[in-house]
């Protein structure tokens, strides 16, 4: 079946505008994706029909919103094939999900002399929380090295694992290079030693099918806004046994069972980790986004985006002086590059003036940029609504940048 690109593009109002007198080309999808009309409508529907606080209200609106909220939790659970919906915790996004685990798991399971392993490919969100935790606990943070192609060095990884390793936290897909990491292999190896693994799925869920039972990961984190849902809503999946053993992350309403003057008892999962009024409209939007992905078909999306990646790699790679950064064997639809010695920022400003939105800089992964010995990169990241013609426009823009600096 041909991918219904025209129909899909019609569903994203933001794409149909002129920027600097040219039709907008949006290639900053790894930063955030645009929203289909169904997601926008779900938010309008929430505020114009159901707005109220959930769980505590006896009235009609509260019950209706609570039902939609909890149904979405079930939908998330089936979206990533979690065994149970009480293992799904709503958060602000990937950053909060990882902070929750670093803080709560860290409090319970990490002590002086222990070790935590992450990789050299991590976004600051899956880096800084572990670095600070290890500093506080006098534990050691170890890094899985990255090959020049942008892959994990698996032999070194196996040597890093020791009796002191308490947790491994790695990204599913690199937001700088697009590398798809061999998370199954990491998890299988770690589990031989009963070491839990957290997977940062921020760059994975909108591009490929994710099955947390098949991966057998212990935690999986992602953000709504990178999968066509609103900002400020995200998910932490955690295995029940671990979540039960972990203390609450934040304290206040909703996460309690009973409060007395001298002590408090905690609510059951998942509410133990959902203190305060949640982002209800975000949850409405997330449900619409998951429906949109399901109706389009994640395998169709993967196939379309793979074609876009192949075309862009060929088209940009063919321009003299363009250096592709990250040439892993398995990649999602993201391409990082440099044009000769031109600083990525200077190139980005010119490309923008041609109506094309790309990202330039360190992409919140400064240690990786240091490893790669580059000043940053220009990053074009594709989503399901992008086209081959748009990639042609990027290639033309790159040639113009070259000519301007010649
Ligand atoms: N991890 C990765 C791999 C990311 O790409 C991002 C966002 N750029 C994050 C974590 C953080 O996501 P958020 O800002 O939505 O919390």
Image (cartoon, helix red, strand yellow):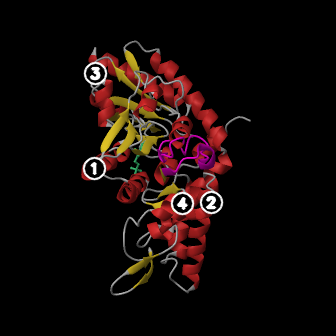
Snapshot quadrant of residue 106: bottom left
Of discs 1 and 2, which sits in the foreground? 1
State the residue lying farthest toward the front: 163
Helix, strand or loop at mark 3: loop
State the residue lying farthest toward the right: 1
The residue at which mark 1 appears reads as 132
In this rendering, does residue 403 appear at all? yes
Of discs 3 and 2, which sits in the foreground? 2
Of discs 4 and 1, which sits in the foreground? 4
Of discs 1 and 3, which sits in the foreground? 1
The residue at which mark 4 appears reads as 241
> Which disc, if any, is residue 342?
3
- For disc 3, the neighbor class at 10 Å (few under 14, some 14 to 19, many from 20) is some
> Which disc, if any, is residue 75?
2
Q: Earlier in the sequence, mark 1 or mark 2?
A: 2
* Quadrant of the snapshot with the N terminus: top right
CA–CA distance in space, label 4 to label 1: 25 Å
Q: Position of residue 66 (x, y in %)?
A: 56, 74
CA–CA distance in space, label 3 to label 2: 46 Å
Q: Earlier in the sequence, mark 3 or mark 4?
A: 4
Q: Residue at x 33, y 87 (%)?
A: 261
């Amino acid at each position: 079946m041909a991918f219904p690109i025209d129909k899909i593009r019609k569903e994203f109002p933001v794409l149909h505008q002129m920027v600097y007198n040219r039709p907008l080309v949006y290639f900053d999808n790894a930063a955030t994706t645009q929203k289909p009309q169904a997601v926008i409508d779900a938010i309008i529907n929430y505020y114009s029909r159901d707005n109220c606080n959930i769980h505590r209200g006896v009235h009609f609106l509260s019950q209706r919103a609570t039902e939609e909220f909890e149904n979405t939790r079930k939908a998330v659970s089936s979206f990533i094939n979690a065994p149970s919906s009480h293992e799904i915790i709503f958060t602000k996004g990937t950053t909060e999900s990882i902070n929750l685990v670093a803080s709560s798991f860290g409090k319970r399971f990490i002590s002086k002399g222990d070790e935590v392993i992450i990789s050299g490919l991590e976004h600051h969100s899956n880096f800084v929380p572990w670095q600070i935790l290890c500093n506080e606990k006098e534990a050691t943070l170890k890094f899985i090295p990255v090959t020049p192609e942008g892959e994990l060095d698996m032999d070194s990884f196996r040597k890093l694992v020791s009796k002191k390793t308490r947790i491994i936290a790695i990204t599913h897909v690199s937001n700088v290079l697009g590398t798809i990491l061999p998370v199954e292999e990491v998890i299988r190896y770690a589990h031989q030693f009963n070491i839990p693994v957290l997977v940062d799925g921020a760059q994975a869920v909108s591009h490929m099918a994710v099955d947390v039972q098949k991966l057998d990961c212990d935690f999986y984190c992602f953000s709504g806004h990178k999968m066509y849902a609103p900002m400020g809503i995200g998910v932490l999946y955690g295995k029940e046994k671990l979540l039960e053993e972990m203390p609450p992350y934040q304290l206040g309403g909703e996460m309690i069972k009973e409060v007395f003057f001298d002590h408090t008892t905690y609510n059951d999962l998942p509410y133990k980790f959902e203190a305060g009024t949640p982002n209800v409209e975000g949850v409405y939007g997330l449900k619409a986004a998951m429906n949109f992905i399901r109706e389009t078909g994640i395998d169709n999306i993967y196939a379309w985006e793979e074609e876009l990646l192949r075309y862009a790699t060929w088209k940009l790679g063919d321009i003299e002086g363009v250096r592709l950064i990250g040439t892993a064997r398995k990649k999602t639809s993201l391409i990082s590059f440099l044009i000769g010695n031109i600083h990525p920022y200077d190139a980005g400003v010119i490309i923008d003036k041609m109506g094309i939105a790309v990202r330039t800089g360190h992409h919140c992964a400064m240690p990786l940029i240091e490893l790669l010995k580059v000043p940053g990169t220009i990053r074009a990241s594709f989503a399901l609504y992008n086209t081959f013609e748009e990639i042609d426009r990027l290639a033309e823009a790159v040639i113009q940048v070259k000519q301007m600096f010649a």
